[in-house]
Amino acid sequence: MKGRVQKNYIAVFIIGVLLIAVYKTFDNFGVILDYFKKLLKILEPFGWGFAFALLLYPFCMKFEKLFCKCGWKFVKKNRRGLAVAVNFVAVIGILAAIIYFMIPPLVKNIGDFIYQVPTLIERMTDYINSFNIVKIDLEYLEKLLSVDNLMKYVKFESINQYASGVMGFSTAFVNVFMGLIISIYVLLDRDRLKNIAKRILKIAICDKTYNIVSRYAKMAADFVYKYLYCLLIDAVVVFILSFIVLTVLRVKYAHIFALMIGSFNLIPYFGAIIATVLTAIITCFTASFMKGVWVAIALIILQQMDANIIQPNLVNNSFSIRPFWVIFAILVGGGFFGIPGILLAVPIAALIKTLLCEYLDKKEAEKETGKVS
């Protein structure tokens, strides 16, 4: 009897301690959240490292298989290290080529464009005023955008905030650079990291759940890989084709417009429309109205070729999602997670669609089986 009473007291004591712990957790939730954010900030380079490693992993595997077939023992023995080295040399070479061939003309075009901005604004205001609907006072606009007027809005007492913004940018650059270095070690030690993750999962969950999680994780990785690489290849192809088209049409700032069209093409549906409209409008004022119309027609034809010929050959039916759900996924992903959310919205939506279809097929099959029995 006495032992039972003691057990009851111990149970009440444990429940009381747990309640106090839960109360203190919610009472200091802000402090805990701040510590959690600080921890995520510290681990940010590792996040970049794993992201770079995941992007380069398929190429490393291909080079590793290629080196495995080589007759030289040194190459065969050190195939992983050589594969990682070749990948990073290729990445550095591509970046160097882009900087050497693209940056100088791009900088020149941007400089010319900035120099032409006042003339462009004047032409736009004259064109809008010609309709006699809305009158824009150009002198007032120039005064409003003058340096002296803009300096009024600069708060020198908030110089610490501006400095922290610059420091934040430099910190992000350092984190990305450290992430590149970390990704090398992640790719070299990926087998050990995989085994550790598998062992932890097998201890934490049962075998059936582990098999389900493993299958869905492989499916998610496959979807993301296929989509991102197809999207990147498509953006490069569109950039090259649009640059050729704009150069043939002798459009000013062809480098800037082609880069904008290729970059905006990473955003499904919206990106192509926005880039085409902006390019056509600016061309109307920098050249002539008819040239702007020809640019719009040429870019619309190019976008239709991309949508009906290039993209279907790159992206298979696993991403055949209706436009409504693609737009919905992009808006939700972009609203919550910014640019990464926009880029990953479609593959995540495709994965959810696949899982939902599998679940519905399973339930319908169970229902049919129940009716037959």
Image (spheres, rainbow, N blue to C red):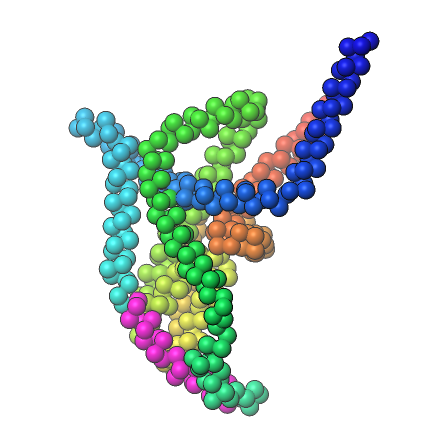
Task: Look at the image and tell me whether residue 152 can be seen.
Answer: yes
In magenta segment, residue 201: no
Relative to 247, does residue 149 appear above or below in the rendering? below
Return the x and y of residue 72 as percentages of the image width and height: 17, 28
**Which residue: 39% across, 69% down?**
298
Q: Is residue 53 above or below residue 207?
A: below
Is 12 situated left or right of 234 in this image?
Answer: right
User: Which image quadrant: the C terminus?
Assistant: top right
- Residue 222 in picture, x, y percent from top left: 45, 39
Answer left or right for 232 relative to 372. left
| Residue nearer the viewer, 185 or 57 | 185
Is 59 located above or below residue 211 in the figure? below
Query: How far across and how far down the image is residue 12, in percent?
Result: 76, 23
- The extreme front residue here reads 157
Q: Quadrant of residue 367?
A: top right
Q: Nearer the viewer, residue 298 or 64?
A: 64
Predominant SS along the magenta part: helix
Q: Is residue 225 visible?
A: no
**Residue 294 pos. (x, y %):** 39, 75
Q: Residue furthest right?
A: 1
Residue shown at 29%/38% (left/top)? 84
Q: Nearer the viewer, residue 261 or 117?
A: 117
Left or right, residue 91 beside residue 335: left
Residue 109 among magenta residues: yes
Instruction: Decide which of 103, 367 is in the foreground and name it.
Output: 103
Residue at the left extreme? 72
Residue at image coords 28%, 71%: 108
Residue at 47%, 34% (x, y): give it.
Answer: 218
Q: Quadrant of the N terminus?
A: top right
Is 156 left or right of 185, judged from the image as shown? right
Q: Which residues fall within the magenta stretch?
A: 106-130
